[in-house]
Amino acid sequence: MLALFLWASGEGLFIFIQPIYIQQLGANPAQIGRVLALAGFGLTIAYLPGGLLADRVPRKWTLLGGWSVGIVAVLMIGFAHDWRGIIPGILLYSLSAFCVPAISATIADSAGPVPLARVLTLTYAGYWAGNIVSPWAGGWLAQLIGMRPVYFFAAACFVASTLAMLMISHPPRPAQARARQMPSLSSLRSGALVSLIVFAMFLAMHIGQPLAPNLLKNTAGWSVEQIGLLGSLNAAGVTLVSPLLGRWSAERKLRGLWAAQALMWTSFGLLFIGAQGLPGLVYVSFFLRSGYGACRGLTSAIIAGHVSEENRGVAFGLAESSVALAQMASPFIAGQLYSRSASEPVLAGLVLIPVGVLLSPLLLKSQVTKRKAQVTRDADTSQALATEGTEQVT
């Protein structure tokens, strides 16, 4: 929690106002959407290999590797002088997220009998707590000394987070027996279905987010400092709401998912109305956007709760890859919609979120089917071993 808090204290300085920084470097809305989509692409290709790595090497190595790459990347972004020059740094920063499955797997290994939905949402609340003050501070610094130095302050926070990560005890090397088995056809089909459902859910919830700062700045006339404060409100919402939804979902997993999606739908509705000249509604909107962060933890818990411990890294990698794929597609789509009308990305979210709500039960059903298939394979393996033993005795 401490390492996540310190990392978020640095990331929050720039992440919420980064679209405006890209605009200052000369990009138009469509180009901003493409740059952010590239960041989503980096996340998409990082998570699943990171999950495989977390299951095969000591997880602390994976964690420290991701932290180190992130420090280099944020310095590259800060030194960029053109929106094209920012692309390598943004892509490398996204690739540094290969350590995220190792974070979740390390947390899950320590959970014991506590439901994963509770322990994941509670521990990741440390990350969001770090985002409460830093977005406002980042906006204030950008207003005072410009946006470029903000990235150097962020790098200092990342170094402090790395020092905290060094204090984490070295977890034991995970078991390898199941990790090296070839996946069955049924498990591949189940995994593909899970990925499709998660992609649809998070595309609906994310499409209205990437260019919301540009909407408020260009249409409603908000300052960068005010927009940074909105990021702080969002982080405060996740810090408070996510653990509550995690506890609420310990027994009934779908209940938390539906509540989180309902919060996102309400958030988009208030943003659409508030951007017309009602700033109070915009503040409430960004607080309720906490549903997105809560939904990530709850979705990962559902997926990882149905696999063996030695394959948890892959499970978390699958969940995060699907989310990242949605975050890659949504900025590109949002950029095209924004070019036609600044409010169209938000309206698209209002239309699509109910579709994601209807798909949520399929996520749980697919996991039940996958679990039954795993039990059947285990029974077949046990029977085969028993038969082999009998033959050897004979």
Image (tube, rainbow, N blue to C red):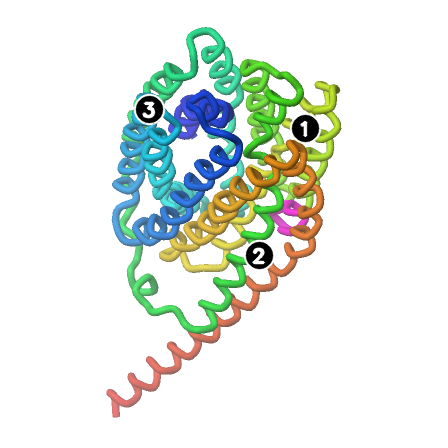
Q: Secondary structure at mark 3?
A: loop
> Where does the magenta region start and end?
249-257
Quadrant into which the C terminus falls: bottom left
Residue 38 visible in the current orientation: yes
Q: Secondary structure at mark 2?
A: helix
Percent x, y of residue 164: 32, 26
Query: Residue shown at 53%/59% (left/top)?
Result: 194
Residue 77, which numbered label?
none
Mark closer to the observer (1, 3): 3
Query: Residue shown at 59%/35% (left/top)?
Result: 339
Task: Of the two numbered discs 2 and 1 on the same chain, state the one appearing first in sequence.
Answer: 2
Q: Residues within 10 Å of mark 2 (few under 14, many from 20)?
A: many
Residue 197, which numbered label?
2
282 relative to 15 in the view: left or right: right
Percent x, y of residue 81: 34, 22
Quadrant into which the N terminus falls: top left
Residue 80, which numbered label?
3
Marks 1/3: CA–CA distance: 32 Å
Asked whether 94 or 336 is in front, the reply is: 336
Measured along the vertical axis of the image, is residue 186 above or below residue 129?
Answer: below
Q: Residues within 10 Å of mark 1 (few under 14, many from 20)?
A: many
- State yes or no: residue 250 in magenta: yes
Q: Secondary structure at mark 1?
A: helix
Percent x, y of residue 14: 45, 23
**In terms of image quadrants, where is residue 60?**
top left
**Residue type at tag 3:** Ala
Residue 206 visible in the current orientation: no
Task: Of the two numbered discs 1 and 3 on the same chain, state the one appearing first in sequence.
Answer: 3
Measured along the vertical axis of the image, is residue 185 above or below residue 127?
Answer: below
Asked whether 383 or 390 is in front, the reply is: 383
- Which residue lies under the disc numbered 1? 285
